[in-house]
Image: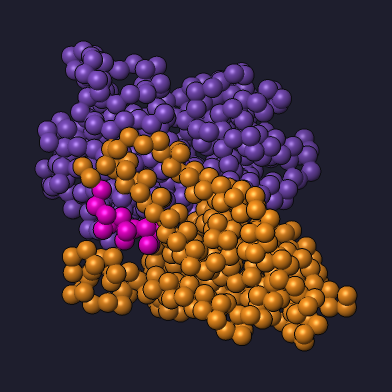
Chain colours: A orange, B purple
Amino acid sequence: MIIDPVTLIVALITVATPVLLAAIGELVVEKSGVLNLGVEGMMIMGAVCGFIVAHETGSVAMAFVAGMGGAMALALVFAVLTQVLMANQVASGLALTLFGLGLAALLGSGYSGLPVPVASRPFPEALQAIPVAGPILFSHSVLVYVAIALVGAVWFVLARTRAGLVIRAVGENHDAAHALGYKVVRIRFATILFGGACAGLGGAFLSVVRVQNWFDGMTAGAGWIALALVVFASWKAGRVLLGAWLFGGIAALQLRLQAAEVGVPVALLDASPYLVTIIVLVIISSDRRRAALNAPAALGRAFHAAS
Amino acid sequence: MKMLPRLLASAALVAGLALPAAAQDDPFQVGFIYVGSPGDYGWTYEHDQGRLAVEEHFGDAVETVFLENVPEGADAERAITQMILGGADMIFTTSFGFGEATNAVAAQFPDVYFEHATGYMREHPNVSTYNARFYEGRAVLGHIAGHMTESNIIGYIGSYPIPEVIQGINSAFLHAREVNPDVEIRVVWTYTWFDPAVEADAAQALIDAGVDVLMQHTDSTAPQTVAQEAGIISFGQASDMIQFAPRPRVASIIDNWAPYYIRRVGEAMEGTWEQSDIWEGIDTGMVVIGEMTDAIPEDVRASAQAMIDAIAAGEYHPFTGPINRQDGSVWLADGEVADDGTLAGLNFYVEGITGEIPN
C-alpha cells in the first residue's frame, strides 16, 4: 500500500499550524532582542482559555480571542519582569512556562471532555470536492489560512517597513536605538505581547480545532519545538513556514509510513526534527559571520536606559 | 526537549508536596504516582477513581496524595522518595515505566508498601505488582470490530511495543479474524501514553489508510474525536469514554482498580499485606466491557456478551490454540492455552498480522 500524498499534505498543514503560529510570534519577539522561553506556557494558556470560552459561549471566534488574551496576560507578566524589573530573560521564560502549565491545569480542571462548537471552514463544499487541490487548498479551518497570512505579514513588516526596521534595530543594538530616540522598552513590550497573542492562538487552535478537547499538558512540548524552529529558520519568516511544514511533515509521514506498514525506524524519524535543529545550529554557529548576520545581536540582553 | 517541561513541572509539584514527616497517630497515607493527569478521561482517570474509592471506603482513617504527570524514568524515583518523606505509608505507581524507580526506592524504605501497576519486577519483599488481563477485553472488542468493519481494515494505536500492548493487538486481531477471514490490522506506534495531539494525528493517519474501526492503547480521548469526525467507529479505552456514545464509541474496555486498591490498602493497614503478583480480568471485574450501544447489530451484541460470559466463567481463554506465530511456526497446538509466563513476555505477532514490531 502506498501513502496518499494529498491526505499527507492536508495532515501536515494541520499538524504544523499550532507550532507555526507560536514560532512566527516568537520570531518577532527575538527579532526585537528578547528571548522568551515561556512559549510553552503561553500556548497552554491559549489552549485552556480558548477551550473554556469556546465551551461557554459556543463561539469559535471568541475562543480565539480568549486564547490570545490569556496568553497575552502571561506575556505581560514576562514583559514586566524582564523589561521593567530587568529580570533575567531565560529564568523568567522558564518560570513563565511552569506558571502557565500550572495555571492552565487549575483553570481547566473540570473542563476536560466538555463539548465545543466545531470550527467552520471558510470555503464551500464544492471547492473542497475538487480533486487534489480541493483538500489541500480549501479544506482547512480559518486559522490555518490566518497563520500562513501572518507569516507573509511578518516578513513584510520586518523586511519592508519602517516599523520592522525599528524592531530589528532594537534587537541588534538597543543602546543605539535608544540613542536615536526609540522607546526600546515600549517596543519590546509590544513584540512580547504580539508573541503571546500568536502563541495563544496556536494553543487555542490545538484545543478548539485540532483535538477539540482540553487535557492537562496537552501542548506536550509544542512550544519548545516552536522555539527550536525559530533557530532552525535562522530568524527568517519564510523559513519558519518551511521549517514548520518540514517538522509537521515528518510527524505526519512517520505515522503514515507505520499505517502503510513500511519498515522504518520510528524512533529515528521521531527524533529527526530535533536532529535537524542541532545540525542547523552547528552549521550556523560554525561560521561566525553568518551567525552574526542572523541572530539578533542583543538577543537575551537586558536593556538599561540609563547606561 | 519534550521531556523538559514535564520534568520541571513535576519538580515544582514535588517541591509543593514536601510536607513535614507524619506523626505516629496520623491517618494511613497512601500515595499515587500518575504518568498522566486524571483529566485524561482514560488510564489515569480510572486510577484516580480507584484512589477516590479508597478515600470513600476508609474515610478519615486514610489520607491519599497523588502526583500527576510524573515522567517515566529516573525522575520518578525522586518523586516517589519525596512522597514517602512527606509521610506516605503505601505507594501505588500506576505505569509500566515506573518499575525500576519503584524497586529502587523500595530498597531504601523497607517499611513502606509498594504496588506497581502492569509491572513484573518485584526485587524486594515490599513490592507487589498488579495488572489486568486487558487482552480479555480486547478479544471482545476484536470480535465486534471483525463484524462491523466494512473496509476490512482495523486500526490500532499502540503506545509502546511492550508485551501488554502486543497481547491486546494479537487478541483483537485473532477474534476479528475469527468472525471475518478478510480482516487486516494496521498498527501505529506513538511512543507515548498520553499526547492528545499525536494520538489524534495517529488516528487520522490510520483513517487515511482506509481504517473504519479504530482501537487505541493510549490514554486520551483525542482519537475518539477524530473517529467521530471521520464517521467511523471506535472503542473507549481504559475508561468508558461514554461521552462519545453511541457513535463513534460503540463499546469500551474499562479498567476497574477500585476493589483492588481498597483490598490492598486494607491489608496494609491490618498488617496482613503480602507480596503478590495479581493478574485479574473479566472474572473478578478488574476488566469491564462498557455498554455496547445500538450501533452494534443485536446479534453481534449477543455473541459478544456470550464471549464475555464464557471468559468470566473461565470456560474460554482468548489465547486458545491452534495459534501460529507470525512466521508460521506453531505457538499453541489445538486446544492448548497460553500460559501466563509466555503472555507476560509476549514479543511476537500472531499469524496473519502483516506489520512488524519495532525494536
Q: Residue at x 41, y 28 (%)?
A: B359
- Please identify the quadrant where the N terminus of chain A is shown: top left
Q: Nearer the viewer, residue B108 or B199?
A: B199
Q: Quadrant of residue A17?
A: bottom left
Location of residue B191 with respect to A77 vertically, above or below: above
Looking at the figure, which quarter contains the C terminus of chain A? Answer: bottom right
With respect to residue A118, does B56 lie above or below? above
Q: Main secondary structure of the magenta part?
A: helix
The one of A261 and B323 positioned closer to us in this rendering = A261
Residue at 24% over, 67% down = A133
Give how far across and how far down residue B328 sits, in percent. Answer: 21, 18
Inspect the magenta stretch and tell me whether residue A10 lies in it.
yes
Seen from the viewer's position, the closer of residues A291 and A301 is A291
Q: Is residue B92 visible?
A: no
Spot occupied by residue B78 in the image (x, y as percentages of width and height): 69, 37
- Locate residue A96: give its quadrant: bottom right
Residue A281: where, in percent of width, then height? 60, 51
Q: Residue at x 55, y 42 (%)?
A: B34
Seen in the image, is B48 located left or right of residue A179?
left
Image x and y of residue A152, in percent? 46, 75
Lateral position of residue B341 relative to residue B37, left or right: left
Up-down relation of residue A27 to residue B50 (above or below): below
Q: Is residue A227 magenta?
A: no
* Residue at the image position 74 percent from the left and 84 percent from the top: A182
**Segment tinted magenta in the rendering:** A3-15
Can residue A197 be seen from the camera position used here?
A: yes
Q: How many marks?
A: 0
